[in-house]
Image: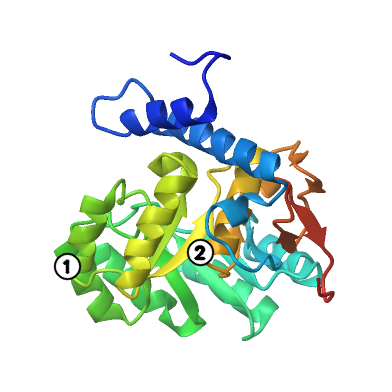
Amino acid sequence: MLDRRRDTDELRGLLDENLCAGSPLTLAARCALDTALIDLLARRRGIPMASMLGGEAIDPVPVCALLTGRTPAELAGEARIAAAQGHTSFKLKVGACATSEDAKMIASLRTALGENFSIRLDANRAWTLDQAEAALRAFQPYGIEFVEEPLRSPAPGDMRRLRQACGIALALDESIADAVALGEFIEHDAADYLVVKAARVGGPTRCVELARLAQSAGIEVVLTDSIESAVGMSAAIHLASVLSRRGAGAGGVRLLSTVSSCGVEFPAVAQVIPAGPGLNVSAQAPGKSK
């Protein structure tokens, strides 16, 4: 389908044709092609990918720290190290064990960090509606920024009921594959945040479209990678620069052994500048301005 003789306009046309249902390209493959095309055009022009996507100012983007400690003590120690490196937002997976155990972990994390740091929770669709309501009520005292994908079957009506019952902001992620799905949740006033991953929705171009739709409805947008290489993390940083400064997720930092490319060693970096050209990024030391 693709070969060296095609110019960028032809490749963009082929990619647009394959955004429809029934395409032989997976969403991840579309993302790879879309990212490569935008990166190529940005490099030709000598500008950051963020500028190609509509970004005006190229400022440092904060990185949210994904925590993996298995005990309250491990978690607290990991968080203190990340905070010393300059991280101000933290993400913790919940829902794989009893709510009481999750609450102990969250309490330890909040005690270690104090009140001036953001804690995000990701349940990965762990709970029924009743279970989610009980869990969120247990977590409410700890000042949670949002809980991502709490419901096993995330119908818009149930998300709205949960949101109204518990007083904790809710985030959508894998429930949203396209604008139609997002529109249903917007219609029901069923979410506060949208977590956007380029590889999941088909590329940076689609990320921008979905994010703009969410923002027009008053939904906050958070950009993350999909636990991938530094190329994917760099794309998330450039997208975050355009769409959101709310602690971009770069989970590959913690879970992959080799994540250095595109101009920066990602481990221990709390702020990243989408410097360009193209996908290139640069590290921002804690406490320093551009």
Query: Measuring 84% from the left and 74% from the top, which residue is drawn there?
Result: 288
Up the image or down, 154 lies above or below 189; here it is: above
Tell me the mark number nearer the camera, choosing from 2 and 1. Answer: 2
Query: Measuring 67% from the left and 52% from the top, which residue is drawn there?
Result: 48
Residue 79's disc number: none
Residue 243's disc number: 2
Left or right of 273? Residue 174 is: left
Figure quadrant of residue 69: bottom right
Residue 96 visible in the shown view = no
**Image location (x, y in percent) of residue 184:** 18, 59
Q: Amino acid at mark 2?
A: Leu
Total tally of numbered discs in the picture:
2
Q: What kind of element bears circle 1?
A: helix
Q: Amino acid at mark 1?
A: Glu
Q: Does the residue at mark 2 contact the one at mark 1 (Cβ under 8 Å)?
A: no
Which of the two residues, 91 or 13, is positioned nearer the viewer here? Answer: 13
**Image location (x, y in percent) of residue 290:** 81, 71
Which tag, 2 or 1, sits closer to the chain's start? 1
Q: What kind of element bears circle 2?
A: helix
**Image location (x, y in percent) of residue 164:** 23, 80
Residue 187's disc number: 1
Left or right of 241? Residue 290 is: right
**Image location (x, y in percent) of residue 240:** 56, 60
Inter-mark Cα distance, 2 to 1: 22 Å
Residue 184 visible in the shown view = yes
